[in-house]
Image (cartoon, rainbow, N blue to C red):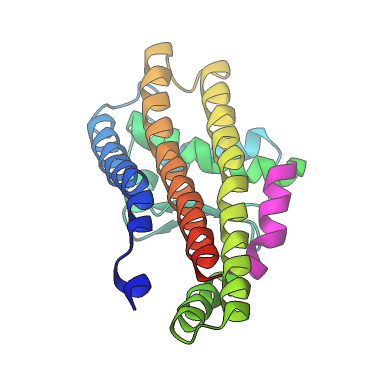
Amino acid sequence: MPYLFYDPTLLFLIPAIILSLWAQFKVKSTFNKYSKVKAGSGMTGAELSKRLLQDHGLSGVEVEEINGNLSDHYDPRSKVLRLSSGVARSRSVAALGVAAHEVGHAVQHQEAYQPFQIRQAIAPAVGLGSKMAFPLILIGLIMSVPTLLDIGIIFFSGAVLFQLVTLPVEFNASGRALAVLKNRGYLAEMEVKDARKVLYAAALTYVAATAVAVLQLIRLLVLRNARD
């Protein structure tokens, strides 16, 4: 029972949890700051994303406005780029940076960028495995069944792999976004610097999520070895 509620390995997670909380604060505060800075182009996030999709010959990708705060994403299955209202309708530097980032994912899909392809390939299995991992781990710990614990850890390892693959996907999309915004003149040089701050604050949340996942996996392995 101590393994279920408290054990010294919980200390492994503290640095990553602190990083995660700070990353969430950082992305929200940075986005809010630069959402008040209007871009010189006067374009909205939706207008920019449509223009960038056209520039890359992605006429088959639709742009939809959705509810939520920073819920923006590209859906490769339906080839739809979904922008939150705060991005789609805004003419701010922050909104244009986020919109360009999501277009970056659509371009990754078009060009079969390998980390993007790997992430999409493993996503269904990882989703199922993630749902099953902790119930199996919990039962394995309560019932002292090492086999169930091992299977749960294997499933959770898939989620860790997914997080690791996500990092290059996100950083690459941001790099693509900043390059096209600068090279094609959609943002002025100072505006590009502001957009970079927004995108890399957002990327930090993925770094934090990966750190939490990796340290959680280490913790589970330590618990497993302690049972031997």
In which quadrant is the C terminus drawn? bottom right
Residue 133 picture location, percent across and down: 54, 73
Tell me where the magenta segment starts and ends, as one range. Answer: 114-128
Identity of the residue furthest to the top in this view: 189
Q: In the image, 65: left or right of 14?
A: right
Q: Is residue 25 visible?
A: yes
From what the image shows, is residue 149 above or below residue 189?
below
**Camera-nearest residue between 34 and 90:** 34
Q: Is residue 100 magenta?
A: no
- Principal SS element in the magenta part? helix
Q: Is residue 89 visible?
A: no
- Which corner quadrant of the image does residue 168 belong to? top right
Give the residue drawn at x 63%, y 46%. Answer: 165
Residue 129 picture location, percent across and down: 60, 72
From what the image shows, is residue 38 above or below residue 2?
above
Give the residue drawn at x 69%, y 44%. Answer: 115
- Which corner quadrant of the image does residue 97 belong to? top left
From what the image shows, is residue 58 above or below residue 64?
above
Give the residue drawn at x 63%, y 66%. Answer: 154
Q: Is residue 119 magenta?
A: yes
Identity of the residue furthest to the front in this view: 228
Residue 17 picture location, percent across and down: 32, 49
Residue 44 picture location, percent across and down: 39, 38
In which quadrant is the N terminus drawn? bottom left
Q: In the image, 139: left or right of 153?
A: left
From what the image shows, is residue 122 above or below residue 26?
below
